[in-house]
Amino acid sequence: MQFIDLKKQYQVLKADMDAAIAQAVEGAHYIGGPEVKELETKLAEYCGTKFCLTCANGTDALTLAMRCLGVTRGDAVFVPTFTFFSTAEVVALEGATCVFIDVDERTFNMDPQKLEQAIKAVKKEGRLNLKCVIAVDLFGQVADFPKIREIADKYGMKVVEDGAQGFGGSINGKKACSFGDISTTSFFPAKPLGCYGDGGAVFTDNKEYFKVMSSLAVHGKGDYKYDNVRIGYNSRLDTVQAAVLSVKLEAFAKYELADRNKVAARYTSALSDLFKTPVVPEGYESSWAQYTLITKSEKERNALQVALKERNIPTMVYYPIPMHLQTAFKGCKNDYCDLSVAENLCKTVLSIPMHPYLDQESQDMVVAALRECATA
Ligand SMILES: *Cc1c(COP(=O)(O)O)cnc(C)c1O
């Protein structure tokens, strides 16, 4: 059994995929071919933003956002401590300070109440400039942006949505990657919408931001390629990946997102008496980048992982270490916020196979193994 079955996905999409790749290869515009602009238009339309710019990966997308907002030394950037390393890494790369925020156990996402407490503590201390909040759509569920936006506005801060795992999710029909002043996503193969290599994108409604990020992504270009007005990067999505993503986006919108939700609903109804299963608040739709259970203890979690492995059922621990306990962030001040929920989650979470091509029979096997091996 695969944790995420990309081979099966390719088999299903093969005819369209092979044709799209062949066309991109034959077109021979390997960088910046027409497929790239076409994809950006479709992505912006899908997410409901004015602009989309593709780039080399999801980490670069966050870096473009940080640079565009002018995040720098002396700035406080509020990030959840329960996330993938990139979210915090890009802040530190600009010389700014990460202020780590705890998450809500039910949704795995940034806890708005704790966010505001930490903002007040940083403000009172008076050492750092309140710059922005990066909220993450963890495991496919959009963060609580209505509340986060209200808090950010109150303190004059910008909002960045790290939608690397959130693509396809929504709140009352408003799609992920449309909630930030700048929103980002990743097309790493295992994400809800993945390509056949690395890829990423930024989304915004702000024309000036779009212009600045478009420049940053191509060596800080000005009016033309050899006019360089700022120090930038080489961060582009290549044409073949854009062709791949066009085919995948169609399948994603047509049935994959719905099928992910069917798989998740079956897991929840079969497992919620034995484990804490993910909570999707009223009005929210998740794209289920992961289906993550909370077990009773670290001991149970680790035993389950071993027992499932013996039955050839892959599981993953996302994430074993919160940002504030990472070696790379050793010495960072982290007493602005109580971080105990994330610390406990790191010990008890277990993600199980989740993808839109998971058939009922395989899913029944996962459920049976979990039920058999769970401790009373
Ligand atoms: C995957 C991921 C990223 C980084 O994306 P890459 O394309 O791998 O650079 C950033 N943030 C989160 C939350 C992620 O899951």
Image (cartoon, helix red, strand yellow):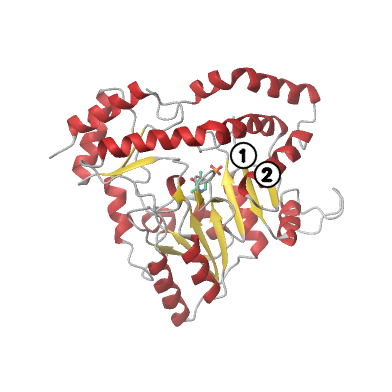
Rendered view: 292 above or below 259: below
The x and y percentages for residue 253 are: 57, 36
Q: Which residue is mark 2?
A: 54
In whole angstroms, how far apart are the C-alphas of marks 1 and 2?
7 Å
Amino acid carrying mark 1 in the image: Gly
The x and y percentages for residue 82 are: 39, 53
Q: Secondary structure at mark 1?
A: loop
Q: For residue 1, which quarter of the picture?
A: top left
Rendered view: 37 above or below 151: above
User: Going 23% across and 28% down the picture, which residue do you hit?
Assistant: 369
Amino acid carrying mark 2 in the image: Thr
Q: Which residue is mark 1?
A: 199
| Residue 210 numbered mark, or none | none
The x and y percentages for residue 176 are: 54, 50
Q: Looking at the image, which residue sits at the far left?
A: 376
Which one is nearer the viewer's eye here, 63 or 247? 247
Label 1 with label 2: CB-CB less than 8 Å? yes
